[in-house]
Image (cartoon, rainbow, N blue to C red):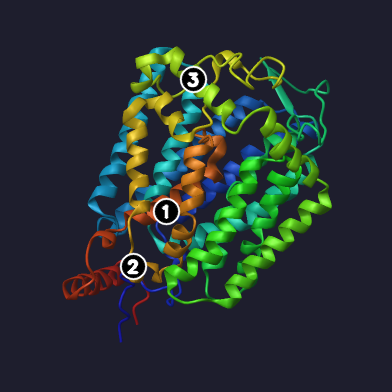
Amino acid sequence: MPQTPNPASGLLSHRCPPRTRALPGRAAVISAIYLWYVVAMRGILVDAGLALPYRLVSQVGNTIVTCLLLAGLLAYIRQRPVRRLLSKSHRAKSGAWFLCVAMYAAYGIARGNDLTSVGKEACGCLCLGVFILIGADDDWWTLLCRHLTILFYVGCLVVTLYYQTPMIQVAGNDVFRDYSLTISAERRYAYSLGYNLRALTAAGWMLTAWGLSQRRPSVLRSFQIGALAGVVWTDVALFVHRSSAAIAVMVIVSSIVLRPVFERRARISAAAAAIAAACIAVALLFASGAVDLLDRRVSEETQREPLFESRNAELSACLRELGFEFTVGRGLGGHFDVTGAGAWAPGNYIGKEFSEWKTLHYGICVLALKGGVVLAGVMVSFLVPLLKHRRRQWYESPANVCAGTLVPAVLAMLILNPIPLSIEGLPYLVAIAMCLSRFGLEVNHRPVGAGFAVRTRSYAREAHGRGHANVA
């Protein structure tokens, strides 16, 4: 008998093996992700003594990555009925996002912004849009998380090997290692090559939530759940990021508390796995000796500088300089002068161009800096559905359970942490976009009834004809 598609995801139920090998655009998207990791690790080749045109490799490589992702998206939407999968409003918001990226890239060029910065941010925003669309398909979650798990652990190994190696500096056409910078635990290894490579592990928290949302035990699932320990090791134990510690706690607590609420049943094995991952992460934290440094950052630095004071000073400097222009934005590649604003004073951070500061630690405000209320408003429109109530049927898909579990962490990161719009933060953008995409599913806004059942059965027959689902 034909199997009825899962109303929660628009695809066949998770009990059916996903046809990831038949995904249109699969080769282009996966090739793009692996290529990005190779380009991101070019500093290792320079450290080994290989003469590389450092910036040129980044510019050409990341341009190819973006083109491959766009080609994969086009191949996917041409062969699969995406219009049946995504709601009309989500498709409209996605179209508005791509339009804004093109418009504010042109505006940034017209304003005379640095072309390299415009290109990096345009590529990053386009990649975000790609995964906001394809992330609505369960098959993409299965496929991408499998490959991201492999690359995540490669990233953890690379960061561990190079967290005491001097960072690569570029001055004109010269590429060199700067031995004048102090690399130590007290300075959180902030001037090391490993610190510059920390984006390699940025998808770890999503992998943990994805592993915990799976219902069948496997070796891959164990590694995905264990990604939490990798994130804590690199971001907290080595680089002492308070926000990463907070995000890790949110993911574990949400997995233990929210997931049983979503699924309306308790899974002891999943809770035990989450607790085990947390215990391993804490053990790594104590073994590294970073607990004292983390405690000092939380207590002493917070007393010396109240929480969010530096973020507020940064935002104030931006508002003073931009004024009404903050509602319009300065285009992709746009920047402002943050010199002397709180912690952003000369001497606090080495090698930073304070007069051309391109980010804000309040994430949504970064979008306003680049595209004013329009670009920020489009992103907010993606966030609003995260707060809506979902029916129980919606959580029949593991991808939806994962996305629902990550809602507190995603909101915290997008509001209180800087958004890396540049393509150099691709794993972070993938994780954020994949979660946002699940809240744009067509069935989220329609009751599940007889009419919908007829529509989904029709969709299953059409999908079978396109090689979309395994209907027996």
Q: Tell me if residue 14 can be seen.
A: yes
Q: Which of marks 1 and 2 is in front?
A: 2
Which residue sits at x=33%, y=60%?
389
The secondary structure type at the circle numbered 1 is loop
Q: Where is residue 37 in the image (x, y as percent from the top left)?
A: 62, 44
The secondary structure type at the circle numbered 3 is helix
Residue 161 image-quadrant placement: top right
Q: Name the residue under label 2.
A: 8
The secondary structure type at the circle numbered 2 is loop
Q: Name the residue under label 1.
A: 25
Of mark 3 and mark 2, the one earlier in the sequence is 2
Which residue sits at x=43%, y=24%?
369
Which residue sits at x=74%, y=57%?
282
Q: Which of 116 and 389 is in front in this view?
A: 389
Q: Count neighbours of disc 2 (C-alpha within 10 A) and say few if under 14, some if 14 to 19, many if 20 or more.
A: many
Is residue 186 toward the left or the right of residue 313 in the image?
right
Of mark 1 and mark 2, the one earlier in the sequence is 2
Residue 96 image-quadrant placement: top left
Q: Is residue 335 above or below residue 87?
A: above
> Label for residue 316?
3
Is residue 267 toward the left or the right of residue 17 in the image?
right
Q: Position of residue 441 (x, y in %)?
A: 31, 58
